[in-house]
């Protein structure tokens, strides 16, 4: 086990290479996924806010309007 | 291609494809990393340090691949005004920059024990550093304009002009004297490395590509949803 981690004396170069790659790639993936989730949540919120305003203005245009 | 031009249809397809891409990528990484550490032998000259190759080479390939994808998408956006092309180019940049940075950093970590130095200003390393700066410039330029369309156009032009760097990187090891070894995988007459090392390298290269597609899908979906948010906001500002 210790032999595996020493990488024939090159452990100080091999492990940081893999560690850095894992850290950067996971960070980019997680931040991208979080960005998508946050934007989707924002869109749903805005959509919910916008709908009453729109039907309200529609009602002004045609007071007896029936949207169905 | 035009069947995917409709952003709404693209969003629907991307949401279905994304989990498959994710699983394929994770599986390829698991297999590739296992082979890289347990079945691939140490190099007779470089010893165990050769295992750095399995992240360094795929990262370097993908650093260039992402730029090529970005340049093609930028050309499509400039010429045909394809609605997804701009978005795809923009979504490729952070991944490409990350891969290029990884290629430089792991190259440095490999260079120290093998060449005795972290860095040399030779053609391969310098042209790769320029590639990294091109990505940074592309992303900075995109956000530098109040008018998003102008930012997209300016950065698309930069992406196209910068594409001249790609053949320079590729052939730098042949055109100039350098510490960096010439290509041993993609060359006339077939690869000159043993299958026991070639297989993990190729599997990890495909895994990196899968990772790129995965992040690309996520970022395109994010960007398209952000566009919808902007439209809704405009509608609210203008009295709904």
Image (cartoon, coloured by chain):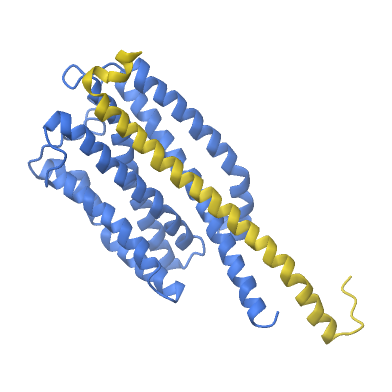
Q: Position of residue B111 (x, y in %)?
A: 17, 34
The chain drawn yellow is chain what? A
Q: Position of residue B85 (x, y in %)?
A: 46, 60
Q: Residue at x 28, y 41 (%)?
A: B103
Give the residue furthest to the left.
Answer: B177
Between B190 and B135, the residue placed more toward the observer is B135
Residue B38, can we see it?
Answer: yes
Q: How many marks?
A: 0
Q: Is residue A2 above or below residue B213?
A: above
Give the residue furthest to the front.
Answer: A2
Horizontal side of B204 relative to B158 (left or right) equals right
Give the residue furthest to the right.
Answer: A64
Residue B6, can we see it?
Answer: no
Q: Residue at x 51, y 64 (%)?
A: B83
- Could you say which quadrant of the image residue B125 lies in? top left
- Could you say which quadrant of the image residue B2 lies in? bottom right
Between A17 and B199, the residue placed more toward the observer is A17
Q: Is residue B234 above or below residue A45?
A: below
Between B223 and B115, the residue placed more toward the observer is B115
Between B32 and A25, the residue placed more toward the observer is A25
Q: Position of residue B127 (x, y in %)?
A: 19, 50
Horizontal side of B106 relative to B82 (left or right) equals left
- Could you say which quadrant of the image residue B170 lies in? top left
The chain drawn blue is chain what? B
Horizontal side of A43 relative to B176 (left or right) equals right
Q: Is residue B132 above or below residue B37?
A: below
Horizontal side of B240 relative to A3 (left or right) equals right
Q: Position of residue B62 (x, y in %)?
A: 35, 43
Q: Quadrant of the C terminus of chain B?
A: bottom right
């Amino acid at each position: 086990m210790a032999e595996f981690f020493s990488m024939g004396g090159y452990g100080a170069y091999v492990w940081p290479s893999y560690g850095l790659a894992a850290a950067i790639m996971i960070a980019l993936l997680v931040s991208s996924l979080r960005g998508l989730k946050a934007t989707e949540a924002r869109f749903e919120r805005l959509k919910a806010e916008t709908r009453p305003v729109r039907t309200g203005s529609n009602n002004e245009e045609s007071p007896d309007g029936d949207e169905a | 291609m035009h069947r995917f031009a409709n952003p709404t249809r693209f969003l629907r397809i991307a949401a279905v494809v994304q989990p498959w891409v994710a699983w394929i990528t994770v599986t390829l990484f698991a297999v590739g990393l296992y082979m890289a550490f347990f079945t691939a032998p140490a190099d007779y000259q470089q010893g165990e340090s050769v295992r750095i190759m399995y992240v360094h080479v795929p990262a370097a390939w993908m650093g260039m691949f992402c730029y090529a994808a970005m340049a093609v998408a930028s050309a499509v956006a400039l010429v045909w005004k394809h609605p997804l092309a701009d978005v795809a180019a923009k979504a490729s940049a952070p991944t490409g920059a990350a891969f290029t940075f990884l290629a430089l950093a792991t190259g440095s970590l490999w260079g120290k024990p093998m060449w005795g130095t972290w860095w040399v200003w030779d053609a391969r390393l310098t042209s790769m550093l320029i590639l990294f700066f091109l990505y940074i410039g592309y992303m900075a330029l995109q956000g530098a304009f109040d008018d998003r369309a102008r930012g997209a156009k300016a950065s698309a032009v930069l992406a196209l002009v910068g594409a001249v760097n790609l053949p320079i990187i590729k052939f730098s090891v042949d055109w100039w004297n350098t510490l960096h070894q010439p290509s041993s995988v993609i060359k006339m007459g077939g690869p000159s490395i043993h299958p026991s090392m070639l297989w993990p390298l190729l599997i990890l290269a495909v895994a990196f590509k899968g990772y790129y597609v995965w992040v690309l899908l996520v970022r395109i979906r994010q960007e398209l949803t952000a566009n919808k948010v902007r439209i809704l906001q405009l509608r609210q500002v203008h009295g709904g």
